[in-house]
Image: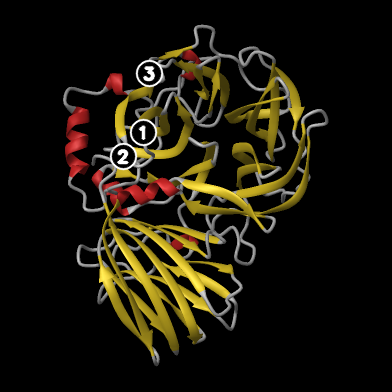
């Protein structure tokens, strides 16, 4: 078939003279550029890819379209770090110039094989605005950091019978001496699935079948993206991003959402016996997470701190989105929890600690900054409504509110001059058992807040785009409250 062409399907090699430099200059001075979150210098970032701790360094690859704050020809950009917080930008890892990736190097994951990092990814193929196919490809990074595409790509050409061209996002892992590849897929009846390939050498792959997740997804779910699999505390875990879920109570209020599933994977029968599943994150801007084994074999996660098909205020500056902070996963009381990675403490600079007591309804400011870590312990609570306002000023603020009568917690980002995404609502919420004490840990970084409640029991990620003066931190309650707090201003971790 004839190759489908459109202006957005060009690579950095097709850039006009000085075009990339001009894009970099246009977004360099944005007041919203994060200081320690991985973000694009220009253009659009989305899914984290190929995450690995390899040869003594952390490697993060990510989807990147260079030319605008939009989804176009996807490259794999690359950053590395020795400590998980100070990131060095490296040359682009994958530029889609081959026929087997004619319309983008789409998402995938990595695995160390024979002392090299095998980076599996999807080659996107388009024949028209709708008609498409997909190839599964391999690139290999050696211990000197050299990356080469496998000479016999694609590993898997096209898609198996019964599925549309929406087959992508390979996750490869080893178990019992064999290799397995999970792929997000769409059946020809336009419902979502996870399919499985197997291999004895991580190169030659055979289609094994479809994974029975034992979850009855609604028929509206038309795609399962970015499947991730790992073992943790004796449990098998799948994290996946279903598209098409409808809002249900406190859940699934984003255009695209993420769930996790705990249980037991049987690779012989391709079944997953489910112990528990639920939405992974309650925020506005969290999608396509990927996990990997850290330096001490802990399970770490990065996610795309953004959302598709929504216009963001930074789009006008020709850049969009960032990744989440690295998070460590654990299973507590039969549920998956996320906590900020311990390594983030290395970013801490000046510290301020204190205690405030509210004797009656009102609010009190406990500091201001643009990039910081904040730890709160709220106790002696004699109030139905209480919480904290971040990015606070006279006219703006991100409101985290606890409601004791309803036993809920909510995050409201409506009160900003540059508010956005209102078509999907300005409030996200979760059930939460509120007793006499609540712990809150927050990381803010110019245009993002990540909120961890009760050691990761509930987590919110929110992009917000405040005015320069909106840097206050306020504690509020409609009754009595004691608040101990500790605030650390945080250092730069990546170049603008």
Give me the residue at 69% from left, 37% from top.
Answer: 193
Q: Earlier in the sequence, mark 1 or mark 3?
A: 1
Relative depth, front residue between 250 and 477: 477
Q: In the orientation shown, which residue stands out farthest toward the right?
A: 269
Circle on res. 82: 1
Lateral position of residue 391 relative to residue 455, left or right: left
| Residue 244 visible in the snapshot | yes
* Residue 294, placed above or below residue 462: above
Circle 1 Cα neighbour tier, 10 Å, few/some/many (<14 / 14–19 / ≥20): some
> Are discs 1 and 2 less than 8 Å apart at CB?
yes
Give me the residue at 67% from left, 16% from top.
Answer: 205
Percent position (x, y) of residue 370? 26, 60
Q: CA distance from mark 1 to mark 3?
A: 14 Å
Q: Which residue is mark 2?
A: 86
What SS does tag 3 mark?
A: loop
Relative depth, front residue between 147 and 305: 147
Circle on res. 145: 3
């Amino acid at each position: 078939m004839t190759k489908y062409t459109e202006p957005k399907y060009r690579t950095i090699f097709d850039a006009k003279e000085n075009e990339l430099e001009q894009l970099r200059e246009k977004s360099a001075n944005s007041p919203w550029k994060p200081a320690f979150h991985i973000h694009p210098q220009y253009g659009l970032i989305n899914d984290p890819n190929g995450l690995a701790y390899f040869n003594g360094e952390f490697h993060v690859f990510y989807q990147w379209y260079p030319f605008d704050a939009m989804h176009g020809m996807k490259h794999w950009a690359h950053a590395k770090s020795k400590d998980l917080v100070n990131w060095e930008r490296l040359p682009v890892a994958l530029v889609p110039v081959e026929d087997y990736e004619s319309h983008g190097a789409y998402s995938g994951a990595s695995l160390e094989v024979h002392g090299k990092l095998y980076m599996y990814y999807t080659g996107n193929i388009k024949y028209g605005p709708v008609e498409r196919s997909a190839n599964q490809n391999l690139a290999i990074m050696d211990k000197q950091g050299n990356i080469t595409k496998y000479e016999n790509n694609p590993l898997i050409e096209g898609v198996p019978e019964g599925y549309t061209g929406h087959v992508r996002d390979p996750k490869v892992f080893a178990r019992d001496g064999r290799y397995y590849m999970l792929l997000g897929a769409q059946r020809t009846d336009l419902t979502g699935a996870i399919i499985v390939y197997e291999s004895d050498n991580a190169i030659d792959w055979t289609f094994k079948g479809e994974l029975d997740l034992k979850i009855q997804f609604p028929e509206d779910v038309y795609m399962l993206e970015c499947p991730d699999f790992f073992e943790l505390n004796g449990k098998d875990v799948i994290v996946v991003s279903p598209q098409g879920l409808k809002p249900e109570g406190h859940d699934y209020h984003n255009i695209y959402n993420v769930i996790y599933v705990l249980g037991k994977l049987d690779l012989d029968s391709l079944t997953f016996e489910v112990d528990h599943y639920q939405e992974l994150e309650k925020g506005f801007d969290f999608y396509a997470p990927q996990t990997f084994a850290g330096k001490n074999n802990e399970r770490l996660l990065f996610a795309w701190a953004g959302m598709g098909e929504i216009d963001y205020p930074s789009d006008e500056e020709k850049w969009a989105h960032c990744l989440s902070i690295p998070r460590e996963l654990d299973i507590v009381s039969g549920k998956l929890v996320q906590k900020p990675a311990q390594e983030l403490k290395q970013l801490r600079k000046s510290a301020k600690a204190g205690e405030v007591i509210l004797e009656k309804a009102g609010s009190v400011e406990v500091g201001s900054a643009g990039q910081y870590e904040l730890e709160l312990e709220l106790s002696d609570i004699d109030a139905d409504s209480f919480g904290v306002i971040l990015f606070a000023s006279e006219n703006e603020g991100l409101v985290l509110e606890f409601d004791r009568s309803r036993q809920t917690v909510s995050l409201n980002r409506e009160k900003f001059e540059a508010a956005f995404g209102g078509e999907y609502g300005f409030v996200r919420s979760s059930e939460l058992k509120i007793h006499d004490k609540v712990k809150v840990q927050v990381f803010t970084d110019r245009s993002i807040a990540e909120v961890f409640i009760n050691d990761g029991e509930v987590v919110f990620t929110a992009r917000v785009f405040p005015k320069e003066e909106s840097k206050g931190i306020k504690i509020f309650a409609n009754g009595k409250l004691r608040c101990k707090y500790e605030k650390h201003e945080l250092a730069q971790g990546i170049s603008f």
